[in-house]
């Protein structure tokens, strides 16, 4: 069900498609190689280190730190209706980085590099199709469906 | 192995070329290069076309260009590594000569970007990053480099004014380049008044899509000496990569591919960064030129902002950079850009750059980046 991931999805088929199902249920998952234990976020099916094709998902805390960000004014196809939007790259506490939108719990004026954030699973409620993503929120913010 | 020499260069006007097809643009540059080399096209053993296919209605571009240039039945092939496609063409031509397969090879970088409608351009713009994990959040080309700029400012105190100095310099020199798309000086006030694109970038931080072509003719050492009075030697020809996804990069204040390719190219050519008198670097966005100074060792990491603000990259400074206007003022027909860079450095090393001539230019460099640093090609060029 990876076609659920992203406002626009370009890769409906992947070996890590369960990621989107987990996200829909409120869980942010990384991958762990069952052969050598190497962890990855974003998840990958094939181990970068030992090249094994066996992996399992594990849940991340979602805690992270803003590495950098930008407010996108000139938006590409499929994003015109949400522009301008603020995108950040976040360093995750458990390793790896994520790109995500800043969510409603953080005011634009308060955004700065180095601030602590929580990566929170989200569903586009206003769209008929299932579309899931994650957003950057104030630390301590929990998944809305809990 | 043989050295590889450049015996001819050609260039067409960059801009909105509604008057010409892509093969007609290629022809302009090819004819110019043949005349420059004072050779007939029968002397060409093969051609390599640098271009990015998704912008053209014509599929498999090398074939139509080869036919229009009158090079059939000689071999041809297309290279694609995004905005570095032109330098990739140079590298494969260089490889074919090094391998002894061909003696004289024409490299043509050509691109027609304005054939696409605005919606088509906007759709392409949404897929410049890694599409599985990043593009679903609406990331764009300017947005990635804007995030590099924000981080560079955060770590090193680089200022908005310093970043804009790149655009001011490149427009200053672009105004003197007859092939450039924008031939007007700009001021910081004008740049600061332009529309926002992705903070902190405004319109004047970004290069523009363009149509255009450039051509370089390469020859083996023996043939170059026979055919040319003043060949320019392509002694460093390096390529390195970085992860497609910015999420897999350890830092976002430079391009690891550029650092690596630069080090390899210097070693191949037996020179150091301090020896380089003139360089064309990939200023697709203002911050990209500042990071290039640092990645190539023209200044220390983090000092690129003051370096440009102190005019160290103007003619007369430590190293003249993008004194043809760069991507910023010339325009960026993506397949043509890398070849256009080599064209400029060859003209500089021959002393044929006119009012933009860098004094005593004997060693030059090109730095051509594909995507967001996924690919980087660095060339070191020398004259005898």
Image (cartoon, coloured by chain):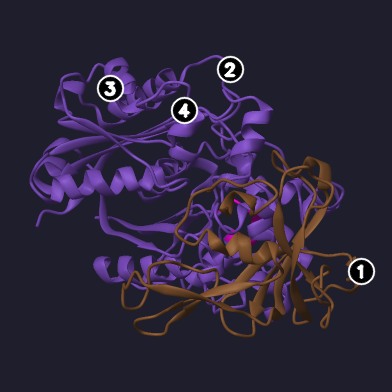
Near mark 1 (Cα within 10 A), the count class, few <14, some 14-19 or many ≥20, is few
Q: At 43% across and 82% down in the image, what residue appears?
A: A38
Which residue is labeled 1 in the image? Answer: A107
> Marks 1 and 4: in contact by CB < 8 Å?
no
Q: Do badges 4 and 2 share one subunit?
A: yes
Disc 3 or 2, which lies upstream in sequence?
A: 2
| C-alpha gap between disc 3 and disc 4 | 17 Å
Q: Which quadrant of the rendered structure holds the N terminus of chain B?
A: bottom left
Say which residue label 3 marks.
B66
- Residue B292's place in the image compared with B383, above or below, is below
Tell me if mark 3 has few (under 14), some (14-19) or many (20+) residues whose alpha carbon lies within 10 angstroms of its own.
many
The colour chain A appears in is: brown
- Find residue B316 and report its horizontal and vertical position in percent: 56, 62
Residue B159: horizontal and vertical position, in percent? 76, 70
Crowdedness near tag 4: few (<14), some (14–19) or many (≥20) residues, C-alpha within 10 Å: many
| Mark 4, residue position | B12
Please name whichever residue, A50 or B128, is drawn nearer the observer in this view of the structure.
Answer: A50
State left or right for residue B324 relative to residue B274.
Answer: right
Q: Are marks 2 and 1 on the same chain?
A: no
Q: Say which chain tag 1 marks.
A: A
Tell which tag, 4 or 1, sits nearer the viewer.
1
Secondary structure at numbered mark 3 = helix
How far across and how far down the image is residue B140, in percent?
Answer: 65, 50
């Amino acid at each position: 069900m990876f076609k659920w991931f992203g406002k626009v999805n370009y890769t409906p088929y992947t070996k890590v498609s369960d990621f989107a199902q987990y996200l829909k249920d409120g869980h942010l998952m990384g991958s762990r190689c069952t052969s050598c234990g190497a962890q990855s976020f974003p998840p990958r099916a094939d181990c970068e280190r030992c090249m094994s094709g066996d992996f399992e998902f594990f849940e991340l805390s979602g805690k992270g730190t803003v590495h950098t960000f930008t407010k996108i004014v000139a938006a590409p196809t499929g994003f015109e209706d949400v522009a301008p939007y603020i995108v950040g790259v976040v360093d995750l506490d458990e390793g790896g980085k994520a790109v995500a939108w800043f969510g409603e719990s953080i005011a634009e004026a308060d955004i700065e590099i180095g601030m602590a954030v929580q990566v929170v699973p989200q569903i586009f409620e206003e769209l008929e199709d299932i579309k899931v993503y994650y957003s950057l929120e104030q630390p301590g913010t929990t998944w809305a469906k809990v | 192995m043989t050295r590889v020499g450049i015996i001819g260069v050609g260039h067409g006007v960059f801009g909105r070329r509604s008057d010409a097809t892509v093969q007609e643009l290629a022809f302009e540059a090819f004819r110019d290069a043949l005349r420059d080399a004072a050779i007939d096209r029968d002397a060409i053993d093969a051609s390599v076309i640098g271009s990015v296919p998704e912008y053209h209605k014509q599929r498999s571009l090398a074939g139509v260009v080869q036919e229009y240039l009158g090079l059939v039945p000689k071999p041809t092939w297309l290279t694609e590594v995004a905005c570095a496609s032109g330098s990739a063409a140079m590298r494969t031509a260089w490889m074919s000569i090094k391998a002894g397969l061909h003696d004289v090879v024409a490299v043509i970088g050509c691109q027609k970007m304005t054939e696409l409608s605005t919606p088509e351009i906007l759709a392409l713009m949404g897929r410049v990053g890694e599409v599985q994990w990043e593009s679903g959040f609406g990331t764009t080309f300017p947005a990635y480099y804007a995030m590099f700029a924000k981080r560079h400012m955060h770590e090193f105190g680089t200022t908005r004014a310093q970043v804009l100095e790149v655009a001011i310099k490149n427009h200053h020199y672009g105004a003197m380049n007859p092939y450039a798309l924008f031939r007007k000086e700009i001021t910081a006030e004008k740049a600061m008044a332009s529309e926002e694109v992705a903070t902190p970038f405004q319109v004047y931080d970004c290069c523009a899509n363009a149509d255009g072509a450039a051509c370089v003719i390469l020859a083996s050492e023996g043939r170059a000496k026979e055919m040319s009075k003043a060949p320019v030697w392509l002694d460093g020809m390096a390529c390195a990569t970085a992860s497609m996804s910015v999420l897999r990069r350890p830092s976002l204040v430079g391009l690891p591919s550029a650092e690596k390719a630069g080090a390899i190219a210097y070693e191949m050519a037996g020179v150091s960064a301090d020896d380089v008198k003139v360089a064309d670097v990939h200023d697709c966005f203002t911050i990209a030129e500042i990071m290039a100074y640092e990645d190539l060792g023209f200044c220390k990491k983090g000092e690129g902002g003051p370096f440009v603000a102190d005019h160290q990259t103007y003619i007369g400074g430590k190293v003249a950079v993008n004194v043809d206007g760069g991507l910023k003022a010339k325009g960026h027909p993506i397949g043509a850009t890398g070849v256009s860079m080599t064209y400029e450095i060859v003209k500089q090393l021959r002393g044929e750059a006119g009012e933009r001539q860098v004094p005593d230019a004997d060693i030059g460099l090109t730095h051509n980046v594909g995507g967001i640093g996924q690919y980087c090609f660095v060339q070191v060029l020398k004259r005898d």
